[in-house]
Amino acid sequence: MGVGLVLGLGAFGAWLYSSAGAKTAVVVVVSEVPTGHPISRSDVSTVGVAGGITAVAGENLESVVGQNAAVTLLPGMLLQRSMVTSGAGLSPQQAEVGVAVSSGQIPADGLRPGDTVQVLRLPDSDSGRAGGVEDAARELVAGARVFAVRPDPAQAGGTLLTLTVPAQDAASVASASGAGQIALVRVAGAS
């Protein structure tokens, strides 16, 4: 009976060891994908994990390529279905507009895709003072979303951004940017 008990416990231990070491392939994010951006094949890979993990199975990796990120995806995240969407990036009430800013027109630590910003039109530097009072900045958009950020090759220290704004405000934002009279202020919002 003692031998049977030892053999039984040994078999049970071997089963536990082999099941604990069993790994399942799941999809993992390898490069940052901002909210709303499409997921490319180079943004994701597979990794073997042990245990009861809830993530997109490795054999379904191709099903997420081309989908849009519903949240900002960071390297090392195990991808879950709720993190991706097949929905279009823009609604009919939204527009994407490009803006160019120089240093001092955005926060010193820069902006990232997904940040929420207030878009301001700065006063014309040639207008001077009107009646002894200097013109103030005027709000164009209270809560625009940063979609993309790139260094501006045309100006040292400059930044090019794509903002998602209400469609009716796109022309005024583009005009302020073209005149060099735009500033972006990071405000509270989901990022």
Image (cartoon, rainbow, N blue to C red):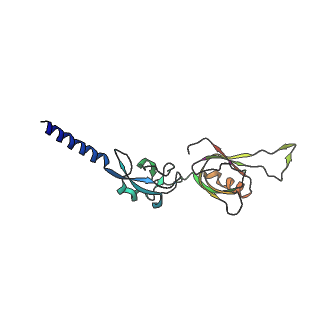
Q: Is residue 111 left or right of residue 156?
A: left
Residue 70: image location, x then y, percent: 48, 49
From the viewer's side, name the closer residue of 161 and 48. Answer: 48
Q: Decide: is 44 above or below 11.
A: below
From the viewer's side, name the closer residue of 119 and 54. Answer: 54
User: Is 111 one of the magenta-colored residues?
Assistant: yes
Q: Is residue 5 left or right of residue 98?
A: left
From the viewer's side, name the closer residue of 42 and 137. Answer: 42
Quarter of the view holding residue 158: bottom right
User: Is 67 one of the magenta-colored residues?
Assistant: no
Q: How many marks?
A: 0
Residue 125: image location, x then y, percent: 81, 52
Q: Is residue 177 left or right of residue 58?
A: right
From the viewer's side, name the closer residue of 84 and 91. Answer: 84
Residue at image point 31% right, 45% down: 20
Residue most extreme to the front: 3
Q: Give the extent of the magenta segment.
A: 106-115
Instruction: Say which quadrant the N terminus sits in.
Output: top left
Residue 9: image location, x then y, percent: 20, 39
